[in-house]
Amino acid sequence: MLVLAIDTSSAAVTAAVLDVSSDEVLIRAQRVTLNSRGHGEYLAPAVAECLAEVGAAPGDLAAIVAGTGPGPFTGLRVGLVTAAVMADVLGIATYGVCSLDAIAGSYAGSLLVATDARRKEIYWARYLGGARIEGPVVSRPADVVTGSGAMAGAGARLYADTLGLPLIDQDFPSAAALVQRAADRIRTAAPTEPLTPLYLRRPDAIEPGRPKAVTQ
């Protein structure tokens, strides 16, 4: 069955169409654009291009898998809203996957995954044998107790000197890993899930307060 994968939790705007069978997850078409402020511009065309490449229409999709972050508010929201709206219109299920889980993939050892949270901070989580054992959390790199093992993610690369672990070359969530994490739910046609974003902190914009009373 054909599945659409979307992730906009980082500077990588990712869309892919994958074929999920009883024992495999295969990428049929994929687009990844590195642009930290281009999620709204690049995602929809990427989805359309992937569908066209495999000769499929939106109605041929069986499900949509979306990375739920953590990630910056605006970019992350683009992917989750796109996935939710498409699924609602098509009447298909959505499944959310923590984007850090997709970076970790099935790495066998101890792994710290960190992405760039801006403001000189990182979003991070710790994994053992591909299973998340801590996080996700937002912290300053110097405040993270790294322990042993390796590290991955764009935040790990950016703050490699501070974190100090061997770096694995996997900066952004993989579409294949996203769908692999949701594969059991897809195969069993599990009920659709709300796509709850992992913002971990409040957006920069705040609601204005009530205007002050004018005294005479």
Image: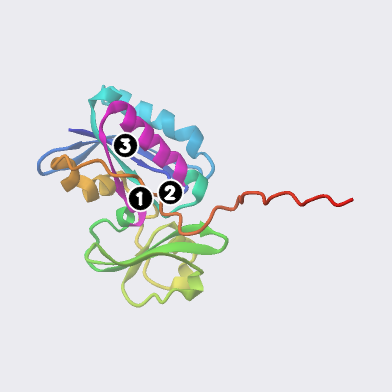
Q: Which residues are magenta?
A: 76-100
Task: Classify 151 as above or below 12.
Answer: below
Q: Nearer the viewer, residue 128 or 67?
A: 67
Residue 211's mark? none
Q: Is residue 92 magenta?
A: yes
Residue shown at 31% from the left, 53% from the top: 102
First in sequence: mark 2 vs mark 3: 2
Where is mark 1, residue-wise?
A: 173
- In the picture, measured across the screen, residue 56 lies left or right of residue 139, that is left
Q: List x then y, in percent, for residue 66.
A: 33, 43
Q: Secondary structure at mark 3?
A: strand
For label 1, the crowd category at 10 Å Cα-Cα, with few meaning under 14, some 14 to 19 and many 20 or more, is many
Where is mark 3, residue-wise?
A: 16
- Image quarter of residue 135: bottom left
Q: List x then y, in percent, for residue 20.
A: 17, 38
C-alpha distance separating marks 1 and 2: 8 Å
Q: List x then y, in percent, for residue 16.
A: 31, 36
What secondary structure predominates along the stretch shown in magenta? helix
C-alpha distance separating marks 2 and 3: 15 Å
Report if the CB atoms under discs 1 and 2 are less than 8 Å apart: yes
Residue shown at 43% from the left, 34% from the top: 43
What kind of residue is marked 1? Pro
- Image quarter of residue 85: top left
C-alpha distance separating marks 3 and 1: 12 Å
First in sequence: mark 1 vs mark 2: 2
What kind of residue is marked 3? Ala
Where is mark 2, residue-wise?
A: 9
Task: Classify 137 as above or below 10.
Answer: below
Report if the CB atoms under discs 3 and 1 are less than 8 Å apart: no
First in sequence: mark 3 vs mark 1: 3
Q: Secondary structure at mark 1?
A: loop
Q: Nearer the viewer, residue 80 or 119?
A: 80
